[in-house]
Every structure is written in structure tokens, then in C-alpha cells.
Amino acid sequence: MFKKILVANRGEIAIRVMRTLREMGIRSVAVYSEADRSCLHVREADEAVCIGPAVARESYLHIPAVISAAKVTGAEAIHPGYGFLSENPAFSAACESNGIVFIGPSPRAIDMLGHKASARKIAMKGGIPVTPGTKNCVTRDCLKEAEKIGFPIMIKAAAGGGGKGIRIVREKSALAHEFEMASSEAKSAFNNGDVYFEKYIEGPRHIEVQFARDSRGNAVAFPERDCSIQRRHQKLLEESPSPAVNQKLRERLEEAAVRLADTAEYVGVGTVEFLMDKERNFYFMEVNTRLQVEHPVTEAITRTDLVREQVLIAAGEKLSLSRNRASSFDGHAIEHRINAEDFTRNFAPSLGRVEEWVVPGGPGIRLDTHMYQGYKLPLYYDSMLAKLVVWGPDRAAAIARSRRALGEFRVGGLSTTIDVHRLIVDSPEFNAGDVDTGFMEKLLAPAAVKA
């Protein structure tokens, strides 16, 4: 087992990884930019190394700086968290060539599954349903491909994620313009302007399945997460299990995730994302070759430490879970992403000092955060302040606990999305489990007018 692991990330996810390392008796190394000297993850680590200026491309995204920090501190492995370099095959390869273990899949797996068009091919090879679409990337002279699929279609960045490079086209007259917009955004976000087409499914749910596979070929899948509550393709709230999935469908989803992992010869922890239509047909969307932001809801209902499983797999050990054990669960969990944003101003970022920080507690409450009173938010990184995760014996109890916890949560000095989450949990549609990916637009239309 490793003696020392460098965490190539910042904030709450870095702290979350370090907690597991401490429980496993493994020393942790933090890296930080000049803007993050006062960030809590720096204090929580056993060692910390400054790797560059505030701008991420010169620090957290600078591969030579991260590798150098690992070498200088004698770290045997690197955990990338999520975001930054976590899905960068060049970073995984750099670790490999420098004799450092990358806690994640191989460069080849990241490259194959991180590129959405090639991931679709792997899904089809594994017999997993995919939405009608182009098998390969397309060029701007692509009207025939679009007409074969049938409008409306979705243009998607082949190398993307996080909602970037996505356009919905309902009429062929808009295709050329939207193609250029999607390709340009993809090029800017991922340095790759390749796009492909998929049939657009009206009013779908966003369902995803966490899986893990070790180097011996043992694979398990966990109960699904419902990530339908999102705005502009960015998730706001996730829950597990989904109120729209029964046990028979759950087994089919888990089987599909395991088949994909086996087909890709994947080693590590990952997530398969699906779209599910109103008839409960599900279609492969993409693979995330890293730990998800929303992994705590899976941990809450399965009593599993997913970071620990990542470390064990990377160390060449066998999965500690059987397939039956991974798919069993207890109760219901909901994660609320609390961001420094002002939803009354179209979710504009809110910057400043945290003047008050009063967090909820009590039974079934978990808070993953790097905030503290007096902390000043740097303007260079994402706006997430905390992940509030609640567990209850059933969905109604979890929603009631969410309502109580959100009422206790007080942040002073900046605007947050706490009030948005209060709107969600008070919504009759959410309480009935009757939501899709367009839910937030409907919810916020009257709220925005009122504000």
C-alpha cells in the first residue's frame, strides 16, 4: 500500500480525499496556487507545495509543476479529484512515465471514453442502448446526417463535458449557425472543436450509474443517481436512488454499466451517464473517468467509501465489494450543491469574504466544504462553497431533512444558492418525483419574476 499520496486538486474535494487517506494511514500532500495559501485544504494536508500563480493553467493545470511536487515530496501516487487534470490522458501518461501511480484509469481508457464519439462506439460494442446519432464527428456540411436522425437534434462536443459545446437544433435552418457556435465553444473549452449529433430526447431524466473495476476484471455497479435537477446542463441537486427507477430497471442499468466497464477493460472508478425518456427507455450518454462531484449520495446509501476503493484499485488490490454488496442500499440521499451565485441576477458569481458561516448538523447530515468564517473567495476558480448531503430512511424523510438543514444553513457576506434549493424542496413536482432536465427553467420562471 502507498505511504504518501499527492492530491492534485483544491478545496472541498482535496479535503474529502485527504480524510480517507488519513483513515488508511497514508500521508497526504497538498498542492496550491498563490491565491490558495489560506485555503483549508493546505492546512489539512501533512505537507503542502506551492505550484504556481493563481491562474489555473499555470498551477493546477500545469502538469510539470504537479509532477515535480510529487517527486520533491516523495509521493508514490497522485489522486486528481475531479475537474482540472482528472480526465486528462496526458497527465495520466506523465504520471506513468515518471514512475508515479495515477489513481484513475489508464491514459488509453481516458482517451477512448473521454472522447464522446469513441465512447458511443464502445457502448454500442457492449450492447448498450444509444440515442440515434452520428457514429463519428461531423463537418459543417452535415445537413444530410441531421436529416437522417430527424429534428430536433443535439450538437455535442466530442471531447467535452460540463455542459460546454452543446446546442439543441429544432429546425434545419438553424443548423449551420448552431454548429459553428457549438464547435467554437468546444474549441475554446477543450482545445478540440470536434462535434457530433444525437437525437434530442424531449423531457428526459438524467440518470447515472457509478461503477468500479479492478485490475483482475472484477466489476461492480452501484444504485443509480438521478441528476435531472440542473440548469444549463450544470447539475444543482442529485439524489439516490431515483424516484423513477424500479428494481427491474435498476438491475438493467447496473448490468449496462458493468458491460461497458468490461468492454473498455476499464480499471478504476467511473460513472456511466444515461438519458431516460418518459417510457423508461434509457440511452447511453457519456462516461466520466473520474470521481463525480455527487459521489457522496452513493456513499450515503451504500455505506461505501469510493475514494478508498479508488486507492485500493490503484494499488493493485482486489475490490473490497461483491456485486451484490455494491448494489444493495439503505434509505435515500440527496446532495445540494451550494454555490456562491446570485440566482436573482441570472446566477451571477458572488465574490467576497465569508462573514458568517453557520452550518447545519444533526442526524443524517454530511457537509463537504473548505469554507470557514473569514475566508475570502478567490476569483479564479469555480463557485462551489459546499456540498450538503442528507440521508433519510426514505425519500420523504430525506426531503424533510433537507428542508430543515437548508433552513439552518446561514452564509453571510455573499449570495448563495441556498434559497434556490429551498424552492426545489418546497416544489410539489419535486416532492412527487415528477421532474426532468427542464424542471429548473419552469421553477425559476415565476421565482425570477417575483425577485
Image: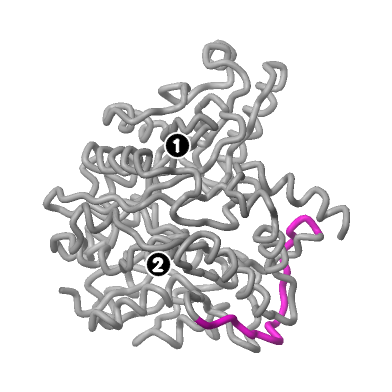
The amino acid sitting under disc 2 is Ala
Q: Quadrant of residue 50?
A: bottom left
Of 288 and 126, which appears nearest the observer?
126
Residue 83: x %, y % from top left? 47, 59
- CB within 8 Å, label 2 to label 1: no
Residue 328: x %, y % from top left? 29, 56
Left or right of 153 on screen, residue 45: left
Local secondary structure at mark 2: helix
Distance (Cα) linking label 2 and label 1: 25 Å
> Where does the magenta region start and end?
345-362
Looking at the rendering, in which quadrant would you find the N terminus? bottom left
Identify the residue shown where x is 57% and y is 77%: 35
Asked if the stretch drawn in magenta spans residue 279, the answer is: no
Name the residue carrying label 2.
300
* Residue 380 seen: no
* Residue 359 seen: yes
Name the residue carrying label 1.
285
Q: Nearer the viewer, mark 2 or mark 1?
A: 2
10 Å neighbourhood of mark 2: few (<14), some, or many (≥20)? many
